[in-house]
């Protein structure tokens, strides 16, 4: 039994050394963990700031693009409204022409008037030639 007591002391010392070693390793592990955590935290906060700036930039670009497309839409809507108004005016003008008389009838009447005026010009030319001949003969 005395051998056991000797071993017990030695075993106790050995056990204390193991426990102390484990405690030191645990403390060092905890210190390394906290150091890594602070490094990761600072990197994470930098990444978060970088992400926030990139998001703000992307958001501003999206707003600018949205405003540009809205401006294009407004311009096209204005042109469309103007074209519709012009088309409406042309239709109303066409209706007024139809209401006052047929365009073909007006054209025929103008052609007859033109023919009469051409005949009148011919008569006046002949009269002018006759007057010129009279003047040259005197």
Image: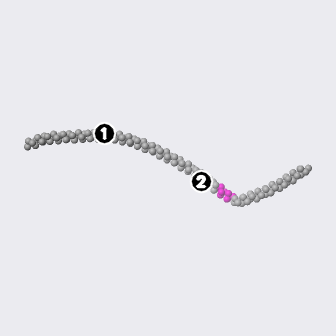
Tally of numbered discs: 2
Circle 2 is placed at which residue position? 84
List the single residue furthest toward the left.
1
Could you say which is closer to the camera, residue 1 or residue 52? Answer: 1
**SS type, badge 1:** helix
User: Toward which corner of the image does residue 91 lie, by quadrant?
Assistant: bottom right
User: Toward which corner of the image does residue 12 lie, by quadrant?
Assistant: top left
Task: Tell me if label 2 and label 1 are in contact, CB under 8 Å.
Answer: no
Q: CA distance from mark 2 to mark 1?
A: 72 Å
* Residue 135 among those drawn in magenta: no
Q: Residue at x 51, y 46 (%)?
A: 68
**SS type, badge 2:** helix
Could you say which is closer to the camera, residue 121 or residue 95? Answer: 121
Q: Which mark is nearer the camera, 2 or 1? A: 1
Could you say which is closer to the camera, residue 93 or residue 24? Answer: 24
Please give the label number shown on residue 35: 1
Query: Which residues fall within the magenta stretch?
Result: 92-100
Q: Residue at x 74, y 57 (%)?
A: 110
Q: Taking 124 as reference, is 104 left or right?
A: left
* Residue 96 among those drawn in magenta: yes
Residue 107 in the image: x percent, y percent? 72, 58
Mark before the other along the chain sequence, 2 or 1: 1
Q: Residue at x 73, y 60 (%)?
A: 108
User: Toward which corner of the image does residue 32 lie, by quadrant?
Assistant: top left
Residue 83 in the image: x percent, y percent? 60, 52
Mark yes or no: residue 25 visible: yes
Relative to 35, say whether 128 is above or below.
below
Q: Taking 132 as reference, is 63 left or right?
A: left
The quadrant of the picture occupied by the N terminus is top left
């Amino acid at each position: 039994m005395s051998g056991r007591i000797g071993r017990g002391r030695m075993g106790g010392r050995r056990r204390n050394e193991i426990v102390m070693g484990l405690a030191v390793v645990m403390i060092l592990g905890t210190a390394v963990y906290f150091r890594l955590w602070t490094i990761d935290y600072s990197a994470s906060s930098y990444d978060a700031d970088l992400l926030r700036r990139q998001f703000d930039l992307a958001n501003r670009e999206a707003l600018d693009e949205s405003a540009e497309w809205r401006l294009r839409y407004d311009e096209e809507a204005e042109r469309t409204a103007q074209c519709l108004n012009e088309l409406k005016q042309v239709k109303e003008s066409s209706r007024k022409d139809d209401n006052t008389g047929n365009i073909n009838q007006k054209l025929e009447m103008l052609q007859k008037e033109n023919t009469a005026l051409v005949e009148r010009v011919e008569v006046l030319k002949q009269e002018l030639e006759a007057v010129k001949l009279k003047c040259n003969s005197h």
